[in-house]
Amino acid sequence: MPFRRKLLLLLTALTPAVSAPAQTAAPAGPSSDPVAQNLNLRFANGIVAVAEEKIITVADVMQYIGPLLPQLRNEARNEKEFQERLEQLQDSAIQDLIDRVLIVKEFRKDEKKQIPVSYIENAIADELAERFEGDRSKFLAYLRSKGQTIRDYRKEVEENIIFQYMQGQQRKSQSVVSPVRIETYYSENKDRFYREDEVHLRLIQLTRTETETDATLLEQANQILERFKAGEKFEDLAKQFSKDLKRSKGGDWNWLKRSDFRKEFSEVAFDLKKGEASKPVLLPEGAFILYAEDRRFAGIQPLDEVRDQIERVLVQQMGRASQERWLERLRRNGYVKHH
């Protein structure tokens, strides 16, 4: 489900690696919050679902979606679209919170599986340092504002670690893609691997001073070219003479398409063969020497060049499909009641 994947990706980006959204988000707003009012209208008793022995409340959902609401508001074109997307977000959050409960239950079925105490302690220490600047009194005040004890918090942290571990195990189980599957994907999606003409460019820029003439600039540039033709590396000459931002990298601008160049450079760069340097290009700001480190011509990229890229795409696809099947099984076998 694209919307749910987006929700999870955004929440991952907004929260520390060891923390669940409910843990890191600000406490749910007061009932005057229109989003909270919306949820309270949908769930009059404040309970949105029960998963196993866990009651999931309106406050839990508000804490989960809180970090996303400003972005949702900015992206919505009007109030109607905002309300529609808000309801989708709420439903996705409810399902995610239910799934977390079921995933933790699945982990605990195997009594041999335990999260080491040191993992929990380290996660709490990191959270204390990052969110509360090491101030334990602020940390305890935060727990009181949530109505939590330290024991509750430790359990929450442990369950966050379990959740991430179980998801990681699912992804790991789908990390091998057969060569045949890669080749099939390539054959069926060749248009995706079309590329334009590209040149791997190195550049030497000689900046014009107030007193320099075209003749003196050209003389300097031609002297550098003679040293290149005599066998010196263009990279070394760029480090020695170039005045542009890439000097320390030997004038390396990496792979560029025609559209990446200013008009004065485009034809010059794409007329070069691999290993060839241009004649000096004279412009008001200085003289430039272009060098083609390598060339790639327009067309479909060979399979060997895109194999790793295809493998990553397929691993992600397989991982999502596998995780959805896994979650569907947990949902079938678990106790879930929606309110």
Image (cartoon, helix red, strand yellow):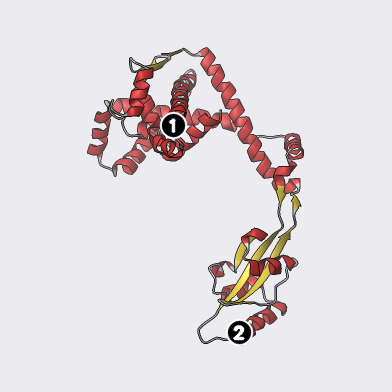
- Give the CA distance from mark 1 to mark 2: 60 Å
Q: 262 and 132: which one is in front?
A: 262
Residue pictured at 74% horizontal, 54% vertical: 298
Residue pictured at 39% horizontal, 38% vertical: 70
Task: List x then y, in percent, for residue 127.
Answer: 35, 39
State which tag comes first along the sequence, 1 or 2.
Answer: 1
Task: List x then y, in percent, for residue 138.
Answer: 24, 38
Task: List x then y, in percent, for residue 316.
Answer: 61, 35
Residue wearing tag 2: 214
When the figure is inspected, residue 140 is found, relative to residue 337, above or below; the finding is below
When the figure is inspected, residue 75 is found, relative to residue 107, above or below; the finding is below
Q: Is residue 291 visible?
A: yes
Residue 332 lies left or right of residue 114; in this view the side is right
Q: Secondary structure at mark 2?
A: helix
Q: 313 and 134: which one is in front?
A: 313
Residue wearing tag 1: 82
Q: Secondary structure at mark 1?
A: helix
Q: Can you tell which quarter of the image residue 339 is in? A: top left
Task: List x then y, in percent, for residue 249.
Answer: 57, 66
Q: Can you tell which quarter of the image residue 231 is in? A: bottom right
Q: Do tag 1 and tag 2 residues touch (Cβ < 8 Å)?
A: no
Disc 2: CA contacts within 10 A as few (<14), some (14-19) or many (>=20): few
Dividing the image into 4 quarters, which one contains the N terminus?
Answer: top right
Q: Can you tell which quarter of the image residue 276 is in? A: bottom right
Looking at the rendered structure, the kind of residue marked 2 is Asp
Q: 243 and 322: which one is in front?
A: 243
Q: Is residue 117 visible?
A: no
